């Protein structure tokens, strides 16, 4: 089955530690995205990547970093500089923007990060 | 800049009753609109989309939405809800950026269906 996997489902870290969230897709999609979800705030875009070795900042990139060394993988690192890292993180991918598939994003199950 | 407003943060409804979840948007370019659904502790799933053509679009699970350009709205409706429709619903607008299709989401509406 094709899809997006995120691991782990729950992650606990101490304040001041960097942590990396995994995202893998086998849908052969070029574009991948990371979102942060907080109660009552919807989804906010952290970073996105259109192709291997290329990525752009989203609306709330401060305190986060990403890499895209392989088409299938787009890991997100939450650094100690992120002031409020506790949240639900969602990874997504999308097929090429053709006339019929614009806006279609496929989401992973998410990782809930708790930092204390 | 694009934005999406979902005025209702929560909508309680009885099973088999009709429901409407409201969404208003603002965009300075061509509009592509979407509804996504999120079941508890899961990722999002595409419910339906409007790209062009007929303003009434049908999606999965019996949902439909109507694009109204003059009112800048894209409200989601279902004539008879089921307990299994309990979830959070997000309206979104799309902006193409090269090969990526960025989405701007609203803050979500939690639909709570009870017996």
Image (spheres, coloured by chain):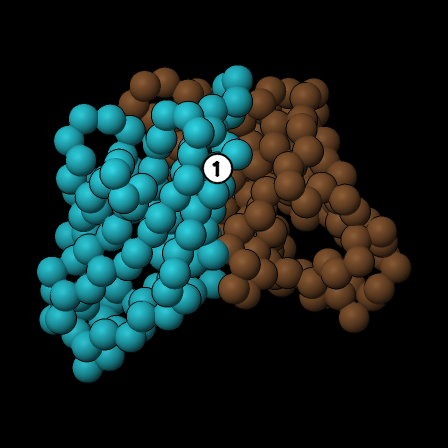
Chain colours: A brown, B cyan
Image point (73%, 58%), residue name: A85
Taking the image as shown, residue B65 lies to the left or right of residue A79, namely left
Q: Which of B22 and A61 is in front in this view?
A: B22
Taking the image as shown, residue A72 lies to the left or right of residue B88, namely right
> Which quarter of the picture shows residue A105?
top left
- Locate residue A114, reporting x and y percent: 70, 66
Q: Which quadrant of the rendered structure holds the C terminus of chain B?
A: bottom left
Image point (36%, 18%), residue name: A98
Q: Which residue lies furthest to the right in this view?
A: A16
> Which quarter of the picture shows residue B39?
bottom left
Q: Which residue lies furthest to the bottom in this view?
A: B115
Residue B46 in view: no
- Locate residue B44, reporting x and y percent: 42, 50
Image point (32%, 19%), residue name: A99
Q: Nearer the viewer, residue A37 or A41?
A: A41
- Locate residue B4, reporting x and y percent: 43, 47
Q: Nearer the viewer, residue A65 or A70?
A: A65
SS at circle 1: loop
Taking the image as shown, residue B10 lies to the left or right of residue A66, namely left
Q: Would you place residue A26 above or below residue A88 in this image?
A: above
- Locate residue B7, reporting x and y percent: 39, 61
Residue bearing the label numbered 1: B2
Image point (17%, 74%), residue name: B15
Residue B108 in view: yes
Taking the image as shown, residue A108 lies to the left or right of residue B9, namely right
* Label 1: chain letter: B
Q: Would you place residue B102 above or below residue B66 in this image?
A: above
Near mark 1 (Cα within 10 A), the count class, few <14, some 14-19 or many ≥20, is: some
Q: How many marks?
A: 1
């Amino acid at each position: 089955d094709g899809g997006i996997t995120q691991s782990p489902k729950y992650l606990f870290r101490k304040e001041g530690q960097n942590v990396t969230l995994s995202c893998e897709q086998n849908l052969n999609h070029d574009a991948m995205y990371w979102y942060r979800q907080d109660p009552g705030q919807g989804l906010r875009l952290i970073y996105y990547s259109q192709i291997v070795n290329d990525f752009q900042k989203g609306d709330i990139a401060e305190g986060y970093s990403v890499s895209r060394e392989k088409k299938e993988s787009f890991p997100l690192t939450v650094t100690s500089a992120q002031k409020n890292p506790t949240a639900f993180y969602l990874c997504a991918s999308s097929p090429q923007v053709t006339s019929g598939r614009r806006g279609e994003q496929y989401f992973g199950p998410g990782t809930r990060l708790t930092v204390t | 800049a694009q934005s999406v407003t979902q005025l209702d943060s929560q909508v309680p409804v009885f099973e088999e009753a009709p429901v409407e979840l409201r969404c208003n948007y603002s965009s300075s370019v061509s509009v592509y609109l979407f509804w996504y659904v999120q079941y508890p502790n899961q990722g999002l799933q595409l419910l339906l989309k409007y790209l062009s053509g007929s303003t009434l679009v049908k999606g999965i699970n019996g949902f439909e939405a109507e694009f109204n350009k003059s009112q800048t709205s894209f409200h989601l409706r279902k004539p008879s809800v089921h307990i299994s429709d309990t979830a959070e619903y997000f309206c979104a607008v799309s902006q193409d950026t090269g090969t990526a299709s960025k989405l701007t989401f609203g803050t979500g509406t939690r639909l709570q269906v009870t017996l």
